[in-house]
Each structure stands twice: as C-alpha cells, then as structure tokens.
C-alpha cells in the first residue's frame, strides 16, 4: 500500500499547472502578474515539496547552494549596522528559487501546450505593441489616461510595451 506522501493531490497538481500557465501568459505583458504568479507558483511548489516523496524534487546538490547563499546573506545582514535596510534590499531575492519551483510544475503540464500558449500570447502582444508604436493607439487605457506622445511624425506609445525590458519593447 502506498504511503500517504506518494498520493497525488489534484488541487496541488491543478494549482501548479494553473500557476505555471499564468506565469508564462503574464510574462508577456505584466510585471505585476509575473510577481503574483511567481509567488503563487512557489507556494504550490513548497506544498509539493513537503507533501510528496516523488522523483521530481531537485537533488540536494542543486538546492544546497541556494540555501547556503541565503544563510550567508542573512548572516551578512545581521552583522551590518543597518539591518533593516539590508533585509529590505534582499526582498526580491526569492526569484532565484523560481527554477526550483518550475521543476514540479513542469512535471504537471504538457510542455508543448505551454509553449504553444506562450507563443500565441507573445504574438498577440507583439502585434499590439507594433500597432501601438506605429499608429499611437492605446486600447488598454481610458481617454483621460492615455500615454501617447508625438515624435518625428510617428506616435510613440509610452505604456505597457514601451519599456525596453519587455519582449515587445525589445522587439521594437
């Protein structure tokens, strides 16, 4: 008879799948969405790690450097004269654990389907960003909040896709 730790939980599996799909979808147009679904994905991944003995856990030699780095960073913060500022600077470092959180999520989804959904959203956002850049349309904001400026007889959208670190902004 299998132990309780090897029984799959459908809520956890669906949570991992939905959060990884949402992370990939929101990565095309929303930094806030990326942050939100990264935290949700990591929560489900922690639940997965502590509730199963399956083989899709990362090996200790891969996880140990992250926790050693975290321990050294916390020790560094404790000996720093301004502890709160140092801890505040470390608040975004959880993102380094995202690859470890993606491991159990990838075992619950079809990678080919995930990539197809991702490519569809990348294409939609890229087309919209090109239209926004060339013609100055800003469909995502109300009339009083549009961020369009004229530059050399072209419209330049200052909005969701004009930042150089977004995929669409990079493509422009």
Image (cartoon, grey):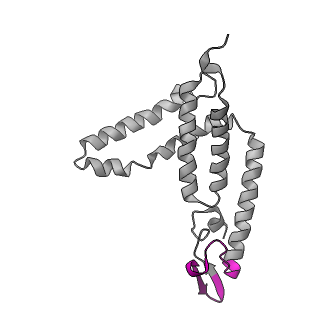
For residue 100, say whether it is visible.
no
Quadrant position of the N terminus in the picture = top right
In reply to whether residue 123 is colored magenta, the answer given is: no
State the residue in front, 76 or 21. Answer: 21
Quick check: 5 left or right of 82?
right
Residue 69 image-quadrant placement: top left
State the residue in front, 125 or 8. Answer: 8
In reply to whether residue 142 is colored magenta, the answer given is: yes
Residue sitting farthest toward the top: 1
Number of numbered labels in the structure image: 0
Residue 122 image-quadrant placement: bottom right
Residue 135 percent location from the top left of the image: 70, 81
Residue 162 percent location from the top left of the image: 59, 71
Quick check: 172 left or right of 73?
right
18 w.r.t. 123: above or below: above
Quadrant position of the C terminus in the picture = bottom right
- Identify the residue shown where x is 77% and y is 44%: 112
State the residue in front, 68 or 94. Answer: 94
Residue 28 percent location from the top left of the image: 65, 58
Residue sitting farthest toward the bottom: 153
For residue 42, say whether it is visible.
yes
What span is in magenta? 133-155
């Amino acid at each position: 008879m299998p132990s309780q730790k090897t029984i799959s939980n459908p809520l956890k599996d669906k949570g991992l799948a939905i959060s990884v799909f949402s992370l990939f979808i929101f990565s095309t147009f929303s930094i806030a969405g990326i942050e939100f679904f990264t935290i949700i994905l990591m929560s489900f991944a922690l639940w997965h790690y502590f509730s199963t003995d399956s083989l899709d856990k990362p090996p200790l030699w891969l996880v140990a450097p992250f926790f050693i780095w975290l321990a050294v960073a916390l020790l560094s913060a404790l000996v720093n004269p301004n502890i709160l500022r140092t801890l505040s600077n470390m608040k975004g470092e959880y993102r380094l654990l995202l690859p470890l959180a993606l491991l159990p999520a990838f075992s619950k989804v079809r990678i080919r389907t995930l990539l197809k959904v991702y490519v569809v959203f990348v294409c939609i956002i890229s087309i919209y960003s090109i239209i926004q850049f060339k013609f100055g349309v800003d469909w995502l904001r109300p009339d009083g909040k549009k961020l369009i400026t004229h530059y050399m007889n072209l419209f330049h959208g200052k909005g969701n896709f004009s930042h150089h670190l977004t995929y669409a902004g990079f493509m422009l």
